[in-house]
Image (cartoon, rainbow, N blue to C red):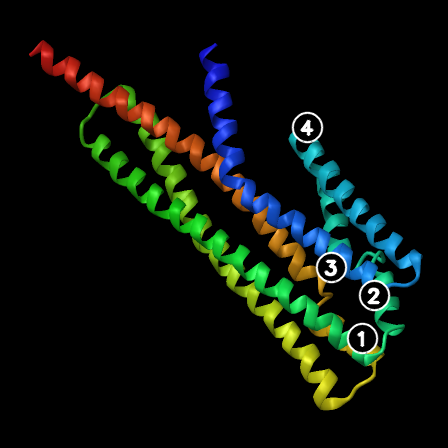
Amino acid sequence: MLSIFITMIFLFFFISFNLDMISNWVVIEMLSFFIMKLYSKDFSIYFEYTFNQTISSLLFFIGIFLFFSEFFYSSMIFLTLFFMYKLAIFPFYLWYKNFLLKSSLFQIMYFISIIYFLKIYLMFIFLNFLLMKIIIFFSLMNTIVISIESLEENFNFLNFMVYSSLLMSIYWILSFFISLSMMVFFSSAYMFSLFFIFFVTFKENFLVKNIWIYAVILLGLPPLPLFCMKFMLLLSLWNFSLLFFILTLGFFFTINFYVNNIFLISLI
């Protein structure tokens, strides 16, 4: 009964704290869906967008399911196909090329101006992601201090928990800096891609076909930065769940530590 109660509390905090990030993800998908419907008079492009999103989701979830089922090689195959799809190596994004080739320069610039609002919205998600990482960083620094203090007390029954907590804290600190560097890199690539399309369209007066070729060669497709931001949302959800679990264990270990101290002092 106690385990069910703790699980329900964990689910409540997990859903309440991450509802904003989940809603951000849904809004991004719906806005992209609305833009494609607004500019595609042909129903086939509208259908291909939904079909491609479904395929990418299936590849991702099958890969994750096989990974947790310990079929690691099969999981790597599906996840590789998923990344190839998002990198436009796997030929599923031909609909995007056809959409650009059939559009005029005015339609493309109007399309980019609408995407500009999406860019601002995604930058708010970046700030949310960064804030979550900062909270994790300071929380784990506190965990390291508590772990070092516990090591100095020479209580054997806590050594294993203290060492594991210390190693986990070091892992999370390294994860913080790696994720932060990835966030800066992909946000810079996303901003530069928009500037590059703007520069090529207005300054050089290239054809739409050339814009497509240069964008693919230098920066990859526009869905790639969007995928990276979705990946960061999933990573932030995973980070929060593990953070809550670690802090909960640390709370109970701290209570156990002080209760045992009080018990030993009472025996003196």
Give the secondary structure at mark 2.
helix
Q: CA distance from mark 2 to mark 4?
A: 42 Å
Of the residues tagged 2 and 3, which is closer to the observer?
A: 2
Which callout, 1 or 4, points at the residue further toward the start of the chain? Answer: 4
Indicate the amino acid at tag 1: Gln
Q: How many marks?
A: 4
Q: Percent position (x, y) of residue 13?
A: 47, 32
Given contact means CB atoms under 8 Å apart, are the residues at marks 1 and 4 in contact?
no
Given contact means CB atoms under 8 Å apart, are the residues at marks 1 and 2 in contact?
yes
Of the residues tagged 2 and 4, which is closer to the observer?
A: 2
Provide the residue designation for mark 1: 107
Indicate the amino acid at tag 4: Ser
Residue 246 can be seen in this image:
yes
Indicate the amino acid at tag 2: Tyr
In this picture, residue 150 sits left or right of residue 167: left
* Circle 1 crowding by C-alpha within 10 Å: few under 14, some 14–19, many from 20: few
Give the secondary structure at mark 4.
loop
Instruction: Point out which mark residue 66 bears.
Output: none
